[in-house]
Amino acid sequence: MFEFFSPGKVSGFAKSLAQNVARRYPPAIANNPDQIVSQKRIAEILDEVFASAHRFEQDNRLGLLSRLSLRSTFKQEMREIGYEEKFADFAVASLTSHLAGASK
């Protein structure tokens, strides 16, 4: 029963989200001002990646601390992958709105 609430599961999910973002929108493109990708396309990519957040939230019934841990680990992983702070913050905000939508 407590396996569903394990920090390892939340951390692993956060890292997989970051890896999925990196596959769809690599840091080399995100951090390069010469590469022009529309905000709409970036939002679509994040929406597609974060669609699984709804399922994860429902399956695991994340509480406040679990959500905070998910966001923190996701941002840390985004920075480790190589994204600039500005994009990492944007991605975390998008993840947060997806999680808020999942709880409704």
Image (spheres, rainbow, N blue to C red):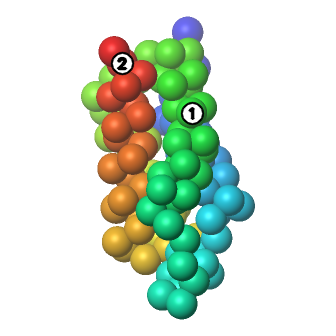
- Dividing the picture into quadrants, the one containing residue 85 is bottom left
Q: Nearer the viewer, residue 15 or 26?
A: 26
Residue 30 position, x and y percent, is: 53, 75
| Relative vertical location of residue 104 with respect to residue 9 in this rendering, above or below | above
Q: Residue at x 38, y 52 (%)?
A: 92
Q: Which of the labelled discs sits on residue 103, or is there none?
A: 2
| Relative vertical location of residue 35 with respect to residue 50 in this rendering, above or below | below
Q: Can residue 5 be seen in this view?
A: no
Q: How crowded is mark 1: few (under 14 residues within 10 Å), some or many (20 or more)?
A: some
In the rendered structure, which amino acid carries the disc numbered 1? Ala
- Dividing the picture into quadrants, the one containing residue 12 is top right
Q: How crowded is mark 2: few (under 14 residues within 10 Å), some or many (20 or more)?
A: few
| Relative vertical location of residue 43 with respect to residue 89 in this rendering, above or below | above
Residue 77 position, x and y percent, is: 52, 61
Residue 74 position, x and y percent, is: 47, 52
The answer for how far apart the CA atoms under marks 1 and 2 are is 13 Å
Q: Residue at x 60, y 78 (%)?
A: 29
Residue 22 position, x and y percent, is: 64, 63
Q: Nearer the viewer, residue 103 or 44?
A: 44
In the rendered structure, which amino acid carries the disc numbered 2? Ser
Q: Residue at x 57, y 22 (%)?
A: 55
Badge 2 element = loop
Q: Mark 1 vs mark 2: which is more N-terminal?
A: 1
> In the figure, is residue 81 to the left or right of 20?
left
Q: In the current view of this chain or complex, which residue is farthest to the bottom?
A: 34
Q: Nearer the viewer, residue 100 or 45?
A: 45
Residue to which mark 1 is pinned: 51
Q: Can residue 45 be seen in this view?
A: yes
> In the figure, is residue 86 to the left or right of 27?
left
Q: Do callouts 1 and 2 mark residues in contact (Cβ within 8 Å)?
A: no
Report the number of discs: 2
